[in-house]
Image (cartoon, grey):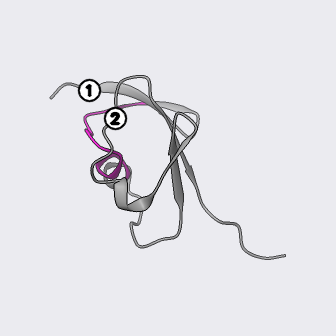
């Protein structure tokens, strides 16, 4: 498979990841941690990550909760 570009938290990256979950694993995200994802501003529920396909030009946002107060 050839690389294509997506935006991950505002940074353009090249990837071969076909799905959101594959991208997260490729980029070293701890799948046990609490975080949420959106693709092109659309929230993607965690159960859909393994099957949610990526396309060149997609904008992926990963948001982690902030603790403290």
Quarter of the rendering occupied by the C terminus: bottom right
Q: CA distance from mark 2 to mark 1?
A: 12 Å
The residue that mark 1 highlights is: 3
| Quarter residue 64 falls in | bottom right
Image: 11 above or below 20 = above
SS for callout 1: loop
Q: Is residue 21 above or below residue 33?
A: above
Q: Residue 28 in the image: x percent, y percent?
A: 38, 56
In this view of the protein, which residue sits in the foreground, 55 or 2? 55
Farthest-out residue, left:
1
Q: How many marks?
A: 2
x and y, in percent, of residue 11 in the image: 54, 33
Crowd tier of the residue under label 1, counting other residues whose Cα lies within 10 Å: few below 14, some 14–19, many 20 or above:
few
Read off the residue under disc 2: 54
Find numbered disc 2 in the image and state the secondary structure of the residue it sits on.
loop
| Residue 23 shown left or right of residue 10 in the figure | left
Write down the quadrant of residue 48 in the picture. bottom left
**Residue drawn at the location 41% of the way across and 66% of the way down:** 30
The one of 37 and 14 positioned closer to us in this rendering: 37
How packed is label 2: few (under 14 Cα within 10 Å), some, or many (20 or more)? many
- Which residue is farthest bottom? 68
Q: Residue furthest right?
A: 69
* Discs 2/1, front: 2
Magenta stretch bounds: 13-24
Residue at screen point 41% across, 73% down: 32
Instruction: Identify the mark at residue 65; answer none if there is no mark.
Output: none
Q: Is residue 18 magenta?
A: yes
Classify residue 56 by image quadrant.
Answer: top left
User: For this view, does 45 lie left or right of residue 64?
Assistant: left
First in sequence, mark 2 or 1: give its number: 1
């Amino acid at each position: 498979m050839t690389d294509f570009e997506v935006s991950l938290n505002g940074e353009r990256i090249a990837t071969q990841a076909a799905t959101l979950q594959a991208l997260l694993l490729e980029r070293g995200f701890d799948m046990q941690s609490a975080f949420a994802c959106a693709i092109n501003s659309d929230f993607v529920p965690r159960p859909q990550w393994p099957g949610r396909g990526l396309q060149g030009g997609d904008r992926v946002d990963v948001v982690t909760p902030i603790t403290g107060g």
